[in-house]
Amino acid sequence: MQLAGLDANPQSAYTQGNRRPRRLVGFPRADGDIYFRPLFLTLLTLLLLISACNDAQESLQPTFDPTSMAVLPSATTESSLTPTPTSIPSATPNPLHPPSPTRPACLDQPGTIVTGELEDPSLPQNLSFRVYLPPCYTEDLNLRYPTLYLLHGLQASDRQWDELGVDEQADALITSGGTSPFLIVMPWQKTGVEIETTIVDILVPYIDQIYRTLRQPARRAIGGLSRGGGWALRIGLRHPDLFGTIGLHSPAIFFSNPYIALWVKDVPEEAMPRLWIDIGNKDSLHESTLALIALLEDLGVPYTSLMPIGDHTSEYWSSHIEDYLLWYTSGW
């Protein structure tokens, strides 16, 4: 029997011999066996081929050998870069850069004020004085020091500069390295004592004999406040062989201009002492000090001046002691 429409090729008749399967899987036969189509064989072949390929790929993978791996640097390997002890710079001192000297322990201690009295047949009474010895004075017995002589004002005593704090300020400057160490001598001009002769002929030789001083004029200064400033000007100008520096602090000048001019002209130009003048702008001696400055300018005498706000008082002098000491010691 011919079945129309079951075959796309109308030129051949549908027979039992040329029929094609319409399903891709087996189906049960009447006798209970499975009927396998050629597709099953094809699928089985493909499965066998895939299995064979997988085996081939596994056989081509390289065998892992830990010893053949290169070791890469890691954070834990940085310690191997630490220099050996032989590569550390040695502590051998460099002669071009010597180590800083150790600060002496005595610099942590304040200086000392020594009081004394000097007897001399030429004096109507003993000369009282104070000496400031800087820190470490008793440590190095071979060291010598510059000396500053400071004169007090009218109706005062050798205590005046001490009470103004000159020793404390000297300590601060010396221990901080602001200035080199030095001595301060503070004599007391008692009634009947002619201070110029006493200082020049008695006190200076005595101080140089008892204490370790530098005896050149360039290493010795004299200064004073108020009337002591007037005496410092006279003594310094008349004895440049002893004093290379003169300080006038609110000076009371009780000598006439002709005397001062004569003293100046008698000083060789190369021996003229360094000169400082200061006075407060409200000081009663301000005008007379300006007249002294004008005279010194006419005589061609170089000087350093300071004209700050202030009066003729202890507060004024005390507030400027650091300025005074820095200037005195700047030449040393």
Image: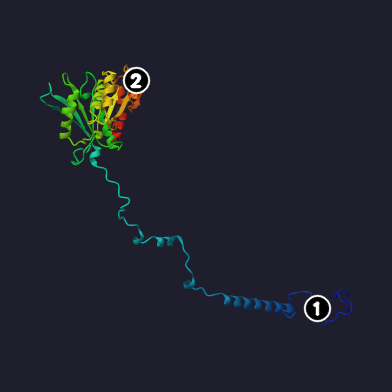
Mark 1 residue crowding within 10 angstroms, few (<14) / some (14–19) / many (20+): few
Q: Position of residue 7 (x, y in %)?
A: 85, 75
Secondary structure under the numbered disc 2 in the rendered image = helix
Q: Nearer the viewer, mark 2 or mark 1?
A: 2
Q: Residues within 10 Å of mark 2 (few under 14, many from 20)?
A: some
* Residue 286 image-quadrant placement: top left
Rendered view: 198 above or below 69 = above
Q: Residue furthest left?
A: 121
> Which amino acid is tagged 2?
Leu
Task: Check if mark 2's residue and mark 1's residue have beta carbons within 8 Å.
Answer: no
Q: Which residue is mark 1?
A: 20
In the displayed structure, does residue 111 sit left or right of residue 33?
left
Most foreground residue, 184 or 44: 184
Could you tell me how far apart the alpha carbons at marks 2 and 1 are, in whole angstroms? 143 Å
* In the displayed structure image, the side of residue 268 where residue 80 appears, left or right: right
- Pinpoint residue 28: horizontal percent, then vertical percent: 73, 77
Q: In x, y percent, where is residue 56?
A: 60, 78
Q: Which residue in the rendered view is the most extreme toward the bottom?
A: 17
At x 27% / y 23%, what residue is drawn? 262
Looking at the figure, which quarter contains the N terminus? bottom right
Locate the C terminus by quadrant: top left
Provide the residue designation for mark 2.
290
Q: Percent x, y for residue 99? A: 30, 49
Residue 100 visible in this rendered orientation of the protein: yes
Q: What amino acid type is highlighted by mark number 1? A: Arg
Q: Nearer the viewer, residue 256 or 23?
A: 256
Q: How many marks?
A: 2
User: SS of the residue at dot 1?
Assistant: loop
Q: Residue furthest top?
A: 284
**Picture residue at 43% right of the left edge, 62% below the top:** 77
Residue 30 falls in image quadrant = bottom right
Q: Mark 2 vs mark 1: which is more N-terminal?
A: 1
